[in-house]
Image: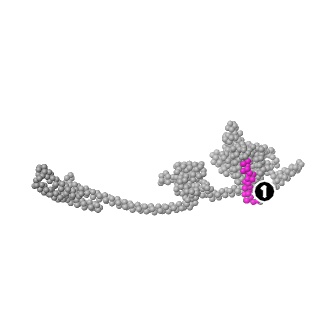
Amino acid sequence: MTIKKRLRMICLIFSIMPLMIVYWLGKNAGLAGNSAFEHAIALGLMSSILLGLFSSGVVRYWFLGKQLEKIKEFCLAVKDGSYNVFLSVPNESSDVDDENEMVELMRNMNWMAHHIKLNEESLQSQKDELEKAYVEQLLVQKQLENRTSQLTEVLHKVRNLLDHAGQGFVSFGQELKVADEYSAECVMIFNKEIAGEDIAKLLYSEDQKQEEFVTKVLKKIFTVEDDYLRETYFTLLPSEIVVDRTYIKIDYKFISHCSEGSQKEIMLILTDVTKERKMEEQIQKEKEILSMVVKVITQYDDFSDAVQGYTTFCYDELPSIIKSDCSISEKLSTIFRIIHTWKGTFGQLNMQHIVKELHDLEATLAKLREEKVTNAATFMELIDSYSSERMASWLIYDVNILKSILGEKFLGQHKMVSIEKAKLDDLIGKIQQWPASPQKEEIGLGLASLTYRPFKELLEAYPDYTVSLAKRYEKAVYPFVVTGGDVLVNPEIYHDVTQTFIHLFRNAVAHGLETIEERLQAEKEEVGTISCDVQTTAENILVVVKDDGCGIDGEHMKKIAVDKGILNKETAFSLSDKEAIKLIFADGFSSASCADEISGRGVGLYAVRKEIEKLGGEIEVSSEPGRGTAFRLVLPLVNNI
């Protein structure tokens, strides 16, 4: 309802209401039936209606006048966004409380328009700033897009380069999980996608102990802050692994992201070095073959004796031992001791194939001895698996290699020497059937001297072997020669015992000499000394093998004897140090923690003692801890010239 209609309604009500009051009063006064009174009331009613209808315009004009039109125009202008309009306010009264409400409304509307204008200017300024910022943002966004495109292109080139670098690049964080990004070569190496894989398990999927060790070291690397200590831990990690018969070289790079707080990563650079390793293996194999060839050429007599002796062992001696009435344990010990000596003999000649096979057989025999096998069926099962033909084939393999290099003619010439020697032995035998006479003695000794050799020649291979062996143990020893021993002897008598001397020189290197670092710490010269001196008397040959190593600790020998069950604790610790040192000659005694192809079976010195005793000789040992050890061997001088 408009204000105009409302004013008309109010004016009608207020103009009619007095007339109705007059009519009510007249009616109560008894004038209800008076016609003059009713005509007067009717005339007043008409006048009131006309007055009410027309007075509303007067009232409206009086109260509002043109103000409503101005307000309407003002509102339309503001609606159209024009805030510069202004309502002129009439100054009807100086008293604010007596001021017309319309005037107050107009003042408020002017104030509102003014503030809207101010806010519009502020908003416009902010709008301009936002538009400017938006334009700048668009420029920056465009630059970022261009830069991102460039970086993506560079990243693609780098990724393409890494994928074709022939190396695997993989990284992982402190959780030891492979990151999602890695080069394509990694898939080729491990034959699968490796994202999220545990790095230690990935490198050692079939070796749980190594996997656990690598995990511990990697966790240490991530937690340690000292760079030097971190590099030390890196040296404990594997530098090379084998994955599906592929040799993989590993380089480690520690990465610390400074911009990302404490985030750390390790990058592995994986390189397939299979070709290099196979080439190295081939070169090493060729070196070993050439070394064997040189040894055979320079020590052909020893080689020839070894071939003949080993062949005899395989086809004659071994079956005799098996068929003998000895107990199973005695047979095992005898075969074990002989195999150990043959391994040393062929090792001296660098015949790698037969040495490896003999080492494996020796390990099998050692296991049976440890288990104290007495069952004949088990023993025969072993003998059946290592037949004479099989054992002889190990030697034939190395001999065939020698034939392929030296030719049949070379070996054949030496075989002829062996035949001539047999003829010579036959001739000597016939002469020995002659009646006794000075002539018989002279001729017999003359013929025998053709086959006799200086005793020192039976030991001439050991000095070079000892120096070479020291290098394998990363130890240093001065070159030396056998002194003395020019007496001529029958080599067949002393062959077996001198073959066992290899254990003396081997033990001097493996157990006697210290490493260079240990010698320096002990204030010794870093290069060790080993010597072999031979002296003769009218009845004996005296051999002394000495070293200036760490010596033998008697207390330690007692403890080993107890640990290996050779002696009980009470008996062992009742021995003097001199008596305890002699325990090294016991069967199965060794101070090595594990056996390799060189030493550690605990049978070497036992074999030396047994062979010396066969000839009726004896062996003694003296040692001073920290100063060295000396072995004194006394052999009877038999059939010398």
Image location (x, y in percent) of residue 484: 76, 48
Image location (x, y in percent) of residue 181: 52, 57
Image location (x, y in percent) of residue 477: 68, 50
Q: In this view, does 415 lie to the left or right of 160?
A: right
Q: Is mark 1 on a helix, strand or loop?
A: helix
Quadrant assignment, res 63:
bottom left
Q: Which residue occupies the foreground of this view, 61 or 634?
A: 61
Furthest residue to the front? 33
**Residue 383 seen in the current view:** yes
Q: Is residue 252 left or right of residue 126?
A: right
Highlighted magenta segment, given as a residue range: 379-408
Image location (x, y in percent) of residue 133: 38, 60
Q: What residue type is labelled 1?
A: His
Magenta segment main secondary structure: helix
Q: Which residue occupies the foreground of this view, 414 or 362?
A: 362
- Residue at 54% of width from left, 51% of height from top? 176
Q: How is the image coloured?
A: one colour
Q: How many marks?
A: 1
Residue 625 part of the magenta segment? no
- Residue at 52% of width from left, 49% of height from top? 223
Q: Residues within 10 Å of mark 1 (few under 14, many from 20)?
A: some
Residue, disc 1: 414
Of the 4 image quadrants, the one containing the N terminus is bottom left
Q: Which residue occupies the foreground of this view, 527 or 111?
A: 111
Residue 401 part of the magenta segment? yes
**Residue 482 seen in the current view:** no
Q: Is residue 278 above or below residue 548?
A: below
- Residue at 61% of width from left, 56% of height from top? 244
